[in-house]
Amino acid sequence: MPRVRTKQVSLARFAHGTARLSPEYCGFVAAACASKFKQHGHSKPAQLRVEGAYNETINVAWDEPDARTEGSLGEKATEFAGECIGIVLSEKLTAFNVVERSWIGTGFDFWLGKKKDPLFQRKARLETSGLDDGGNADIDTRVSRKKRQVGAGSHSSCGECLIIVSQFRRPIAKVVRDA
């Protein structure tokens, strides 16, 4: 029987930045994610269950966040942690990578481009969200709200949209591909 290999994500590696996102930003949201894993008592690595358009478990390696960083995050930690999970999952599971943050009013968080086609960017959109707690109904409600938000945004007809809602108590991420 073939051995199934679990996908891995390292927040320490992500914290060094991506092709289009700075190490400062990536490090900050990675620390927010680690602080959420720590707050909810998850092991290292945390097992993130992915549901929706993808169904698998991803091991997320994380390091203890600095106390100063945790103090800097405050109540925004869940929002930033949701951005982190959304970015790493979009880049791990799809043919897209994050190109840049979108503008307020667009209805989504990030522009995505095809990894293998660097000339033609802004091919898709990514909307992220984070929840500290809640069941499947809470996650589905947040997904529905995000779909309405993306649909009402100024760029609602600009290609595919990935919506990724993360919940950190279990931890789980729901990925929805919405055209």
Image (tube, grey):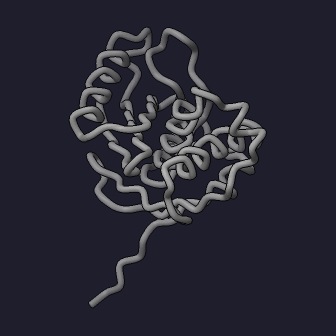
**Residue at horizontal 68%, vertical 42%?**
26
The quarter of the displayed image where residue 143 is located: top left
The image shows residue 82, relative to residue 154, as above or below, that is: below
Front residue (pair 56, 159): 56
**Residue at horizontal 60%, vertical 26%?**
101
**Residue at horizontal 37%, vertical 19%?**
150
Query: Where residue 92 sits in the image (x, y, percent)?
Result: 49, 54
Disc tally is 0
Query: Where residue 51 sits in the image (x, y, percent)?
Result: 29, 50
Front residue (pair 24, 141): 141
Front residue (pair 81, 176): 81
The image shows residue 75, relative to residue 1, as above or below, that is: above
Apparent side of residue 91 relative to residue 144 in the rendered image (left or right): right
Apparent side of residue 115 relative to residue 156 in the rendered image (left or right): right
The image shows residue 53, relative to residue 164, as above or below, that is: below
Residue lying furthest bottom:
1
Front residue (pair 135, 176): 135
Residue lying furthest left:
137
**Residue at horizontal 38%, vertical 36%?**
165
Which quadrant would the N terminus be assigned to in this image? bottom left
Which quadrant would the C terminus be assigned to in this image? top left
Query: Where residue 140 sits in the image (x, y, percent)?
Result: 25, 33
